[in-house]
Amino acid sequence: MNTNKKYIDQLSIDCVVFGYTHNQLKVLVPKLDFEGDFWALPGGFILQEEGIDKAAQRILEDRTGIKDIFLEQYGVFGEVPRNNLDLLNTLRATNEDKFSALKLKDYTFEWLSQRFISIGYYTLVDINKVVPKLTDIDQSIDWCDIKNLPNMILDHRKQVGKALDAMCLNLDSKLLGFNVLSEKFTMKELQHLYETVYDKSFRRSNFQKKMLDLDILDRQEKKFTGAANKAPYLYSFKQKTN
Amino acid sequence: MNTNKKYIDQLSIDCVVFGYTHNQLKVLVPKLDFEGDFWALPGGFILQEEGIDKAAQRILEDRTGIKDIFLEQYGVFGEVPRNNLDLLNTLRATNEDKFSALKLKDYTFEWLSQRFISIGYYTLVDINKVVPKLTDIDQSIDWCDIKNLPNMILDHRKQVGKALDAMCLNLDSKLLGFNVLSEKFTMKELQHLYETVYDKSFRRSNFQKKMLDLDILDRQEKKFTGAANKAPYLYSFKQKTN
């Protein structure tokens, strides 16, 4: 048991970090530092004195080096059975030395092998603005294409799917917070982002009308391209005022 | 401590049951069976062998008699500090006899006074279709108007607000599940429901266009009123096919 009660029992947090760059949607997937293929979402536990949103930020920073990102809490994974016992037994069998020197400092095998309920958070970042760091619990950390994810432990693959569904719902209301485009962007750049996240094409005129109707954009000066008549307008997100 | 570990430590579930009837939105609020005004959402704890959605159903049935309702999990309340210690001390001071005979059978004072993180569920029901029952932990159970809620313990009032926000988001995608209207209904009845939930008026023509554009309604035969030319169309929700 976790006798000192540093962390809340049986409750974990998992983070899905979506990364966007030119027409590609990726997910940040660390690989655990054990022999074998153990890919997992960045996750961890909640300190007794820590709010869950803060815990999510700390866990993400500890596991990826990413700081101060707007994380959205989107769901809880709490069905039964849901525990790490099989995984822990496999790790112990195949990685005896590493396992006994365990990097899982604060917790025992028994504590970790309990049923866990996990609170899911996700975020969307510009891949070019974020440099994930390799920390000592992981062997590698990679941006994996959403359509080509590795096998992941537990229900982590399912979590990615649910997080994507949550992100697609009312995406327009969250883009200002996610800060994934440049401060000023063209309608085409915005359309590419939507097409990539939703994985489908939109007609240019429909898309533009829909976006303008949402009243979330401010139109800026034209982008200077040298050919004035073809220069596209630039837009920025309206700052929320409440 | 909860030595037998029947329930998961430090994790609770709270349910917001919205009730709708003719232009009124209410919330089901039980009053705890202690001297003093202790109003609370129906809530409880998660058994070790029980999925969280099932736990929410069981808790709601135990506390209100309401069975097999479509409950939507919408958020987690996990900031710090968040515990029942002040409440429990007040109850103990003012209700000594009742408190020592405690109806909180499975748990001790120490267990209950820990920090709790709560998973929030809500539902929307037709008040006329649901008859809440008074169970032995509560003194009374009432449908309270959303604009005139009593003082509630902990953050339960805030939970009602957050649940309402969640319900308003994409309400059209959930109405089939909530089953709050008759199987067939007029556009006017649907509009009244929206106006009550969102607490604002919509223009009739705009509302009708918006609803038809959503492609969630099937138009049925006209309602027979005796005056054929004025009979309104009836609608039903399209069954989801996936």
Image (cartoon, coloured by chain):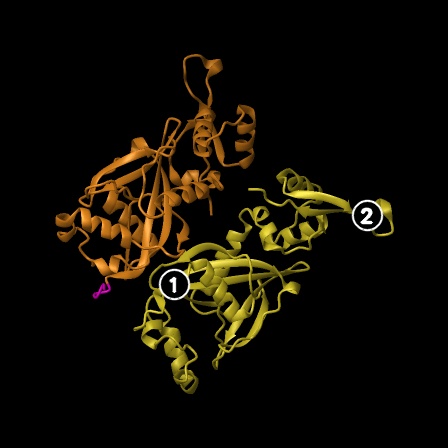
Chain colours: A orange, B yellow
Q: Is residue B139 above or below residue A43?
A: below
In the rendered structure, does residue A233 fall within the stretch colored magenta?
no
**Does residue A199 show up?**
yes
In front of the other: B196 or B98: B98
> Where's residue B168, x and y in %?
55, 50
> Where's residue B241, x and y in %?
58, 42
Chain under label 2? Answer: B
Q: Amino acid at mark 2?
A: Ala
Instruction: Check disc 1 and report the residue beneath it.
Output: B49
Q: Is residue B129 above or below residue A64?
A: below
| Residue at disc 2, secondary structure | loop
In front of the other: A132 or B176: B176
> Where's residue B101, x and y in %?
41, 84
Please tell me which of labels 2 and 1 falls first in the chain: 1
The answer to which quarter of the image holds residue B196 is bottom right
> Where's residue A225, x and y in %?
41, 16
Left or right, B31 with respect to A6, comes to right
Labels 2, 1: front one:
1
| Residue at disc 1, secondary structure | loop
Residue B231's mark?
2
The residue stretch that appears in magenta: A1-5
- Decide: few, some or many residues near mark 1? Use Cα within 10 Å; few <14, some 14-19, many ≥20: some
In the rendered structure, does residue A2 fall within the stretch colored magenta?
yes
Residue farthest to the front, as pictured: A93
In front of the other: B183 or B121: B183
